[in-house]
Image (cartoon, rainbow, N blue to C red):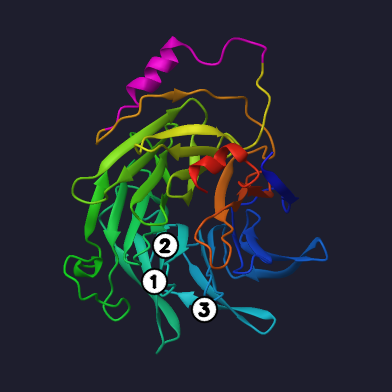
Amino acid sequence: MAAIAVHQFAQCITCHAWSPDHAMVAFCPNNNEVHIYKLIQEKWEKLHVLQKHDQIVSGIDWSVRSNRIVTVSHDRNSYVWNQEGSEWVPTLVILRLNRAALCVQWSPKENKFAVGSGAKTVCICYYEQENNWWVSKLIRKRHDSSVTSVAWHPNNVFLATTSTDGKCRVFSTFIKGVDIKEKKEGTSSDTKFGEQILQLDLSFSWAFGVKWSPSGNTLAYVGHNSMIYFVDDVGPSPLAQNVAFRDLPLRDVLFVSEKMVIGVGFDCNPMVFAADETGIWTFIKFLDERKTSSSGPKYGSQFSEAFGKLYGQSKYGVGNDAVESSRTRGGTHVNCINCIVPLREAGSSRITRFTTSGLDGKIVTWDLESQEDLLNYHL
């Protein structure tokens, strides 16, 4: 078992985020509120309830440097919360959306944040000191459907998005007066705001969670067809591959190192994917130990294996046609895992612990260092 702590906070959790020192956790219990809990004498106590939204809160992110919380909701609004004394004070964000806001993430420098929406639009928000509010510049007419996830590149300019149109895209978000222009030619600051750097048509189904590797050299995202996609050399000639598996689709991913990714989703159990020395990605194991059911027919068939191999071929670069074996669902989580958040130690670039939350209302802390067979992949 890699799970070292399991806490039942609610009947259902939409999303969660941790404070910079990991002493407090903020989550949405599947309604229009955000609850903030703190561990006091080995017991979680509710400290604050953020009430400003009118509908379900669909995204939360807690900034590491400035200790600010940003929330988005199906009510088409977003707020940035600043702690003043013992209270959290909201600041209005001008999104200009006519559909629900679905996801949000702070940029690495925390001078911007990105909001994906059901309006086929991405809002890049930044602070205006004069009016004391956050305004947004919109990336329009690029997506054909709802934007399900956003992920910032380490350079603070490139932004990756996934959409229910099945595509993953990379955009430039350079804003004059907010971002600093680099002197070197050919850098990210030479691109214009909203310019599309790359469009990936690897998935024939909805695309969900997307993440960059720590160096920004690799991009990973998942599809609703039980496949995960890895893209190297992001640019005009990307090198892409995919891994097909027989289990239920993933909803989100997390790079714990350059060569290892954790995927979570409808299978209720984190899945580990890793790259070998040649750069080929494969499924390694489930994190939550479970017994294989010996009753009933063998899971899978020649047809399903052939089907998996057929759709396991990549359009770009190297294709991985391995259809990995699976096991029965169930374990620490008993419902879909929809959020995964790293617990990065101060001053350290590697991630050995992370938390997951899901529709079962649990927040689970996982420890990778207890998995001896994973240490070979350079956690």
Q: Quadrant of residue 49?
A: bottom right
Q: Residue at x 65, y 36 (%)?
A: 288
Q: Is residue 117 visible?
A: no
Res 75 label: none
Question: Could you tell me residue 241's position as x and y percent?
Answer: 32, 36
Q: Is residue 375 shown left or right of residue 187?
A: right
What amino acid is found at the position of numbered circle 1 in the picture? Cys
Question: Could you tell me residue 102's position as x and y percent?
Answer: 46, 55
Q: Residue at x 55, y 74 (%)?
A: 68
> Magenta stretch?
294-314
Residue under pointer 2 = 115
Which is more N-terminal, label 3 or label 2?
Answer: 3
What amino acid is found at the position of numbered circle 2 in the picture? Val
Does residue 313 sit above or below 56 in this rendering?
above
Residue under pointer 1 = 125
Which is more N-terminal, label 1 or label 2?
Answer: 2
Does residue 301 sit above or below 119 in this rendering?
above
Most distant residue in the left direction: 185
SS class of the residue under badge 3? strand
Question: Could you tell me residue 14's position as x and y percent?
Answer: 59, 52
Which is more N-terminal, label 3 or label 1?
Answer: 3
What amino acid is found at the position of numbered circle 3 in the picture? Thr
Do the residues under discs 2 and 1 have CB atoms within 8 angstroms?
A: yes
Mark 1 vs mark 3: give the one in front.
1
Residue under pointer 3 = 91
Question: Could you tell me residue 365's position as x and y percent?
Answer: 66, 50
Q: So how many labels did they put on this image?
A: 3
- Could you give the CA–CA distance between mark 2 and mark 3, rounded to whole angstroms? 16 Å
Q: Is residue 234 shown left or right of residue 377?
A: left
Q: Residue at x 33, y 33 (%)?
A: 204
SS class of the residue under badge 1? strand
